[in-house]
Amino acid sequence: MTALETPNTAQEILAASKAVVPKLRARSVEIEDDRRLPADVVELLRGTGVFRMGFPKELGGPGLTSMEQIEVIEALSYGDTSAGWCAMIGMDAGLYALTDPVIREMFPSLDVIAAGMLPPVGRADRVPGGYRVTGRWSFASGIAHADWVSAGAFVHAGGERERTASGKPYWRVVMVRPDEVELIDGWHPTGLAGSGSLDYTITDVFVPEERTFSLGEPTRTGPLAAPDALMRKMPAVGLGAARAALDHVRDEVRSKVDRVTGRPWTEDYRVQFAIGECEMQFAAVRRAVYGSLEDRWDRMAAGATLDDFTPDERIATMLTRLAAMRAARTIVRRLYDLLATTSIYRPSPMDRWLRDMETMCQHVMAQDQIVQSAGAFLLGGKPQFPLALGIVH
């Protein structure tokens, strides 16, 4: 592979991602202060091949499994949480349910970056050849450096909202160019500041039919065709940041001595127990995430669909995903407390990791409605967030 070629296998992409970790770590303060990724950092990520991970081999992509995607995002998040978050979001283009000819037209390079919001908060009016789209969407991570912007919208025809056969409102995701979007910069968050998660509006823009898709109408087969494929990689960011915090604190502890007793921290029961418990929690949730995904992947690769899973099997990946995100926050909090006042001074990475984790866990995928949706699905009730279960229509 020459220096000009983008990595295009799971092994190559993971190696390239690990190689840029020191560069990302060195830029973390700048990334946070800028409230978005600097242009050269975006290109650094693009060069790892992370944004092409979801494109299948038949389109020239690497076709990484969900587990391989998580491993790469973990590595990048170990360097910088915001960079890992933007990589996790930006690689969605390869997972979108567009047809192969449209993908080749829209993405002449597979190293494209997607941004936007999939939930249908906009309006798409049917017109000949496509839709006219209007709306405002929030929290579009990485939109300032995106090559394409996605936006979910309820479909209307003749002024009336269209409905599915089951009576639910019908919605599609539209794809527009960045110059068809107006950005609204109100992004001044507690954490994940470098993700540049801006609001955006689209006003009466025509979108051709072929540049739209429905999560419930896949255009290919296999494990990555299911509606939940876009969500499977989300715990990777928290896992990467928690691992970074654990390694940082373990290094810090080795040189610390109690100022009163003169006893090394490495011999302090309190410190030993805290480190051990955090490692226990990390190992448990990480294995749960990978194990659940491996089981789902193997069965779907053999031809199973989500409908072939029992209710208990169906909820497994969504709950382990949430548990990992919350566990990452708990681990970082525990380590922050362990270092005490050392953690509070900027630019301590502990301060940034804690704020990043607190912000990450405000995402819907780490909220109680995901737990409620799992419980409701088991009991035959109504999930508040059915998309987490892969239910679209």
Image (cartoon, grey):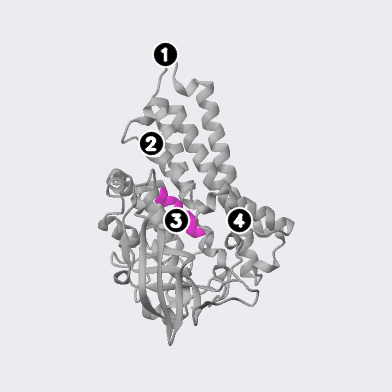
In the image, residue 322 sits, relative to residue 133, either above or below, namely: above
Q: CA distance from mark 4 to mark 3?
A: 18 Å
The local crowd at label 1, few if under 14, some if 14 to 19, many if 20 or more residues have their Cα within 10 Å, is few
Under circle 2, the secondary element is helix
Q: Which residue is mark 3?
A: 72
The amino acid type found where label 2 is placed reads Asp
Q: Which residue is mark 4?
A: 317
User: Callout 1, which amino acid?
Assistant: Gly
- From which residue to which does the magenta span run? 68-77
Of marks 4 and 3, which one's residue comes earlier in the chain? 3
**As shown in the figure, which amino acid type bears the numbered disc 4?**
Thr
**Mark closer to the observer (3, 2):** 2
Report the quarter where the C terminus lies: bottom right
Q: Are marks 4 and 3 in contact (CB under 8 Å)?
A: no
Q: Main secondary structure of the magenta part?
A: helix
Whether residue 75 appears in magenta in the rendering, the answer is yes
- For disc 1, the marked residue is 262
Residue 272 appears in the rendering: yes
Front of the two marks 4 and 1: 4
